[in-house]
Image: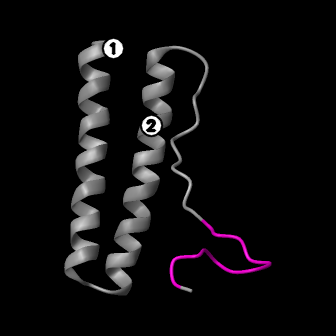
Amino acid sequence: MTGAGPGPGRTALHPVPTSPPVVPGTLADQLGADFVSACAELARARLRRRHRDSRENRAAVEGCAARVDVVLDLFLETCGR
């Protein structure tokens, strides 16, 4: 029987979308937390690229670096520092 689910006694696992935790406080606090998260993602992407230099890993590094840039730009635009 095709498409009937995972079968008796088994559960289907579906990925749950996640988002960064909400940090109470000012916008600057939230952007600071986002910056820390983006930098951590960038570090992990760089480690994956160092371990295996592939097109996908290079693209991940570029994407993470772009996210860091966006967070920094938002901080400068909104906090004026």
- Name the image quarter holding residue 63: bottom left
Tag 2 or tag 1, which sits nearer the N-term? Answer: 2
Q: Is the stretch drawn in magenta largely helix, strand or loop? A: loop
Q: Are marks 1 and 2 in contact (CB under 8 Å)?
A: no
Circle 1 is placed at which residue position? 79
**Residue 68 within the segment the image draws in magenta:** no
Vertical side of 64 occupied by 70: above or below: above
Percent x, y of residue 65:
26, 53
Placement of 71 over or under 2, stated as above or below: above
Q: Residues within 10 Å of mark 1 (few under 14, many from 20)?
A: few
State the residue at coordinates (21%, 60%).
62
Residue located at (80% from left, 78% from top) = 9
Residue 39 in the image: above or below residue 49: above
Query: Which residue does the numbered mark 2 point to in the structure image?
Result: 34
Judge from the rendering whether residue 31 lies leftward or rightward of residue 2; answer left or right: left
What amino acid type is highlighted by mark number 1?
Cys
Q: Quadrant of the N terminus?
A: bottom right
